Image (cartoon, rainbow, N blue to C red):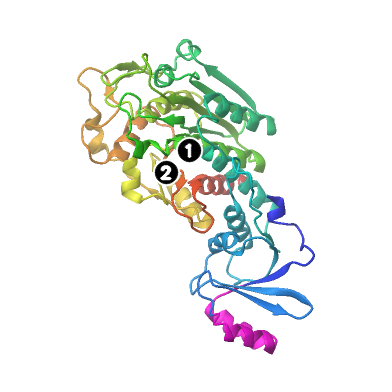
């Protein structure tokens, strides 16, 4: 990754000019006549994603890239796929574009998941003067961590391997990591995590990472770690099961955020809780109509075993609340209803604290990590009523599925300031900075928010 964003200009690197149509006209007036004529004769007009190679006698050829009329820093994320192999340095770009943001989206566009391919691609290298290279690399490495985990198939990334990934993360930053596995979950009072994962070959577990000075404000993260979701006894059809290796995307996103926090040495005490299960099917799988105990003490009626994520999150959130954090955040690939509401590119979030909501929305805009606040509408709370238990884990209505899932989780967070992300964790189509495959949604915005709050105090 460092090679894709070199610290200095490599020998023989081609100068890269990022131009709008207006800036192109200015460039043509200043360029050598032979170069200007070449550009005009070949019809380069600086339209979005238009590329022109301009030969120059005795020097590396110039590379012109069109940005269109309304360029943004994230547009550069499309260039690695367009340019292919090669070495470049940024010779010119609109002054309004933040160089660090450009560098981050360049690296995001360079990402390829090729662990199982014999032939590896060689993304281009680009030197960008003025970028905060250390911060950019820290963010990019966190993004790669999350993407690699989500993209790895479940026959390789089982519950044991995801647990190890948390331990490896902790070791890198000298954090304390512990885990509770299998039947020990019952002894330690995590009955719903155990119930969801008990049918799988690899045992369920709850992994806990702690980092930082305990005298600092406590920030707790929870990430849904369903390494594969068959739907359980309410089994999914093939169409809807194919992508379910990504159902641990919440855990991957929470780990990416934790990595950024630790790398930046934010003055917080960090707790990361990752409940890890395989929602598999066997003779001892939990069933629709079962009633489960929870860590909080509420009894929960099971309506559909394909709504397993909120069950394991509920036990983990209950544990996180016991530390009385200043802020509790969870990430989960939780509902299809969230995709119906906002599509795959924007992450909906729910919160019980408007101050944190306002901070998050400002940070999301600044970091080009789009999120959108959804309502914790208590008018739907009675849709979770159960005739035989304290609560049903799914709604009695087919409407507002993402809202009612958030309302279920809210029962387990008390009055702690809390943000819940219902993410997709996947890029269906290639777009700037987002190759097809596993992706992060929310961590860049949250990190920016935490950085602003705690590094400025």
Above or below, 266 against 211 in this view is below
CB-based contact (under 8 Å), mark 2 and mark 1: yes
Q: Which residue is tagged 2?
A: 424
Name the quadrant of the C terminus: top right
Q: Is residue 280 left or right of residue 237?
A: right
Q: Residue 273: x percent and y percent?
A: 52, 28
Q: In the image, what residue occupies the spot 61% across and 58% down?
A: 106
Work out whether 264 lies above or below 53.
Answer: above
Residue 249 is marked as 1
Q: Is residue 265 visible?
A: no
Mark 2–mark 1 distance (CA, rounded to whole Å): 8 Å
> Which numbered tag is attached to residue 391?
none
Which sits in the foreground, 12 or 27?
A: 12
Q: Is residue 231 located in the magenta-colored stretch of the structure?
A: no
SS at mark 2? Answer: loop
- Residue 96, compared with residue 124, is above or below; it is below
Residue 79 visible in the displayed image: yes
Residue found 75% across the figure and 57% down from its top:
7
Q: Please report the bounds of the magenta region as a residue range.
A: 18-44
| Quarter location, residue 173 | top right
Residue 237: horizontal and vertical position, in percent?
32, 34
Question: Does residue 29 show up magenta in the picture?
Answer: yes
């Amino acid at each position: 990754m460092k090679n894709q964003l070199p610290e200095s200009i490599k020998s023989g690197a081609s100068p890269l000019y990022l131009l709008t149509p207006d800036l192109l006209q200015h460039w043509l007036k200043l360029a050598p006549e032979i170069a200007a004529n070449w550009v005009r004769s070949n019809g380069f007009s600086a339209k979005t994603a238009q590329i022109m190679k301009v030969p120059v006698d005795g020097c590396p050829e110039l590379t012109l890239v069109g940005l269109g009329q309304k360029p943004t820093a994230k547009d550069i994320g499309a260039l690695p796929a367009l340019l292919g192999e090669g070495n470049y340095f940024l010779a010119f770009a609109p002054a309004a574009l933040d160089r660090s943001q450009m560098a981050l989206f360049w690296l995001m566009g360079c990402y390829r998941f090729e662990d199982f391919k014999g032939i590896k691609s060689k993304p281009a290298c680009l030197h960008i003067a003025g970028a905060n290279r250390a911060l950019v690399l820290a963010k990019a490495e966190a993004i790669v961590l999350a993407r690699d985990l989500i993209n790895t198939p479940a026959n390789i990334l089982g519950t044991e391997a995801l647990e190890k990934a948390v331990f490896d993360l902790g070791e890198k930053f000298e954090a304390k990591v512990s885990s509770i596995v299998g039947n020990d979950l019952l002894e330690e009072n995590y009955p719903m995590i155990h119930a969801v994962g008990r049918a799988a070959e690899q045992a369920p577990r709850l992994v806990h990472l702690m980092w930082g000075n305990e005298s600092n404000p406590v920030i707790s993260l929870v990430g849904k770690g369903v390494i594969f979701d068959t739907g359980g006894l309410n089994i999914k059809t093939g169409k809807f099961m194919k992508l379910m290796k990504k159902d641990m995307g919440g855990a991957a996103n929470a780990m990416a955020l934790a990595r950024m926090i630790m790398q930046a040495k934010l003055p917080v005490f960090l707790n990361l809780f990752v409940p890890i299960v395989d929602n598999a099917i066997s003779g001892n799988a939990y069933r629709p109509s079962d009633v489960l105990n929870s860590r909080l003490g509420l009894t929960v009626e099971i309506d559909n075993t394909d709504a397993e994520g909120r069950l394991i999150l509920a036990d983990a959130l209950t544990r996180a609340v016991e530390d009385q954090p200043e802020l509790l955040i969870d990430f989960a690939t939780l509902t299809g209803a969230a995709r119906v509401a906002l599509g795959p590119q924007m992450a909906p979030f729910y919160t019980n604290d408007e101050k944190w909501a306002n901070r998050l929305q400002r940070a999301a805009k600044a970091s080009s990590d789009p999120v959108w606040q959804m309502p914790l509408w208590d008018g739907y709370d009675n849709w979770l009523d159960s005739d035989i238990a304290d609560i049903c884990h799914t709604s009695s209505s087919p409407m507002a599925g993402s809202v009612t899932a958030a309302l279920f989780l809210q029962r387990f967070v008390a009055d702690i300031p809390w943000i819940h992300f219902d993410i997709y964790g996947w890029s269906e189509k290639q777009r700037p900075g987002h190759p097809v495959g596993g992706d992060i949604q929310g961590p860049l915005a949250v990190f920016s928010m935490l950085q602003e709050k705690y590094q400025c105090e």
